[in-house]
Amino acid sequence: PAAPAAPWQVEQVERLRLPTAVPEYWSCQGAWTVPVDESTLDALREIFGDASKLVDCAWRIEKEDLWIQYAEERNKVLQQMEQLQRQEIFLEQWTSRVEARKLPGELFAEVGECFLFQASDGGLDIV
């Protein structure tokens, strides 16, 4: 059997991991698209400013297997970023005005996470 990891090794492994579980605010209904709650819709309207009158509704895509794949890749990026830091290569963190708003969930700046939006003119049906 393998020897147990030294405490500093366990600490380092835990530090290199971001959450992989689906976000707490997800409905977990097994649906692909879920309407966002009113507070999220209000935050989106604030983000879009003058164009907010065009924001009638919003949906979130909730696909658990894709989320898990994304979260694992995000952890790989974190490990690569920490390798760069150990080599004294530092990258500037960037945050847009969107990230400062009150949208649900947590963004991890250390891996450059940001929100992405897709819009339609309302004439599209999502199946």
Image (tube, rainbow, N blue to C red):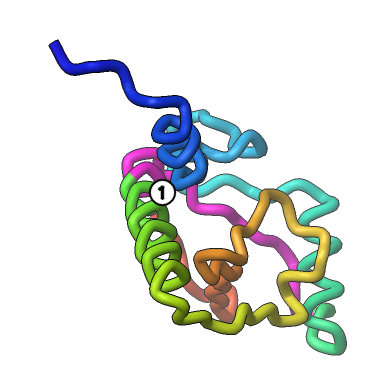
Q: What stretch is highlighted in magenta?
A: 54-68
**Rendering coords of residue 66 (x, y %):** 34, 48
The answer to whether residue 91 is above or below residue 4 is: below
**What residue is rendered at 77% in x and 80% in y?**
97
Where, quadrant-wise, is the C terminus in this rendering? bottom left
**Rendering coords of residue 4 (x, y %):** 30, 17
* Residue nearer the viewer, 75 or 36: 75
**Rendering coords of residue 32 (x, y %):** 43, 45
Q: Is residue 1 left or right of residue 81?
A: left
Say whether residue 82 is visible. yes
* Residue nearer the viewer, 37 or 103: 103
Q: In this view, does 29 lie to the left or right of 102?
A: left
Q: Is residue 58 left or right of residue 83?
A: right
Residue located beneath label 1 in the image: 71
**Rendering coords of residue 18 (x, y %):** 50, 45
Say whether residue 31 is visible. no
**What residue is rendered at 67% in x and 49% in y?**
105
**What residue is rendered at 86% in x and 73% in y?**
46
Report helix, strand or loop for mark 1. helix
CA neighbours of label 1 inside 10 A, class few (<14), some (14 to 19), many (20+): some
Where, quadrant-wise, is the N terminus in this rendering? top left
* Picture quadrant where residue 103 is located: bottom right
* Picture quadrant where residue 49 is located: bottom right
What's under tag 1, amino acid-wise?
A: Ala
* Extreme residue in the left direction: 1
**What residue is rendered at 79% in x and 86% in y?**
51
* Extreme residue in the top direction: 1
Q: Was residue 55 drawn as part of the magenta stretch in this picture?
A: yes
Q: Was residue 58 drawn as part of the magenta stretch in this picture?
A: yes
* Residue nearer the viewer, 117 or 58: 117
Q: Tell me how many marks there are.
A: 1
Q: Is residue 5 left or right of residue 43?
A: left
